[in-house]
Image (cartoon, rainbow, N blue to C red):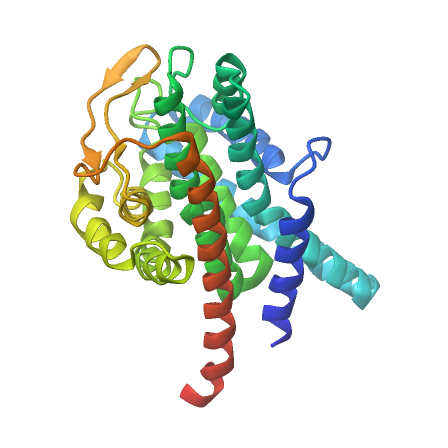
Amino acid sequence: MNHIIDIYIAFTIDAVIGDPRWFPHPVRGVGTLIKALESITVKLFGRNRFAGTVTGVATVAITALFVYYSIYFANIADESAGWIVKIFWLWAGFSCRSLANSAEDVLKELKAGNICEARKALSMIVGRDTEQLNEMEISRAVIETVSENSVDGIISPLFFAAIGGAPLLWAFKAISTCDSMIGYKNERYIKFGTFSAKLDDAANYIPARLSIILYTFSALLGGYDAATTYKTAQRDAKIHSSPNAGIPEAATAGALHISLGGDTIYGGVKHKKELFGKEFPPPTINDIAKSIDLMWIVTGVMLALLACVHLIAPFIN
């Protein structure tokens, strides 16, 4: 049970203080490692799939081993120090508060009528072009980001932390960072980033499907439409280009009775996308707060689920 208690402690720290902006987050270090390995492997093998695979595998292995041995050697020096280092790595691997804060920053500017500032705040958390977005489009983008990141920023980290502690959690964080940095389908990374993109899809596969249950139950607890949450997730998730990202977005659309998705501009190029919950109206700024509320409920349900599984596991063996 101590393992789950450690996760609870670390997650509570994240929920209270998040990631201070002055703090040099370890993900930046992973990003630096990826750039260094990319430079080396491209020089050795060229910009191809093999080089990209070596970069991805090495990034994940080095990150996981670094976290493992930092805890190991701290524990040799002093058990309390080892525990503190472990809690640090767990805390740094969670991003619930920072996600909520980022969404709330955009909401605050929208409520104040500062649409230019809202666009700037949004640009910090999305990859799409934000310069010309109107209030509805900004609201849609925020809600999509909150829902999509509820899997790879909350559910998946908790899932891997429960299975393998901080080292496995940071193996996942390394996978996710590789995908966000080199997993693009552009000319530069179409071959080099293939492995990282596929590995990220594989890592999030189970947590994303678990999110259907989590969102449905959370909708029920939060007073939203649980039946439509499940139905929309099952019906519309497949329209997303990602095998995972569409699930929480479709579930959110069903829960809040709003449409998400649609055409989006990246790098000046319009990408045609279908709608999740096409029978519902577009989101408003009021739906941003609802999506954040739903995200917190989903998080609580996931934490409760981990505790239940840990409690019953001894009786199954």
Q: Quadrant of the N terminus?
A: bottom right
Give the camera-side residue of 160 and 189: 160
Give the camera-side residue of 113 and 202: 113
Examine the image and state in which quarter residue 97 appears.
top right
Can residue 47 be seen? no
Q: Is residue 67 above or below residue 187?
A: below
Q: Is residue 18 left or right of residue 55?
A: right
Q: Quadrant of the C terminus?
A: bottom left
Name the spot of residue 30 as percent of width and height, x first: 57, 37
User: Residue reaching furthest right?
Assistant: 78
Q: Is residue 11 above or below residue 286?
A: below
Please give the name of the residue rendered at 55% of the width and 50% of the height, measured from the top-left corner: 170
Name the spot of residue 198 as percent of width and height, x first: 31, 42
Name the spot of residue 94 as percent of width and height, x first: 57, 49
Please give the name of the residue rendered at 49% of the width and 23% of the height, measured from the top-left corner: 110
Name the spot of residue 144 as percent of width and height, x first: 37, 36
Give the camera-side residue of 82 and 285: 285
Q: Is residue 213 above or below residue 315?
A: above
Please give the name of the residue rendered at 48% of the width and 17% of the height, measured from the top-left corner: 119
Examine the image and state in which quarter residue 148 appears.
top left
Examine the image and state in which quarter residue 54 appears.
top left
Q: Is residue 223 left or right of residue 209?
A: right
Q: Is residue 261 left or right of residue 110?
A: left
Can residue 283 be seen? yes
Q: Is residue 10 above or below residue 2?
A: above
How many labels were placed on the picture? 0
Please give the name of the residue rendered at 54% of the width and 40% of the height, measured from the top-left corner: 100
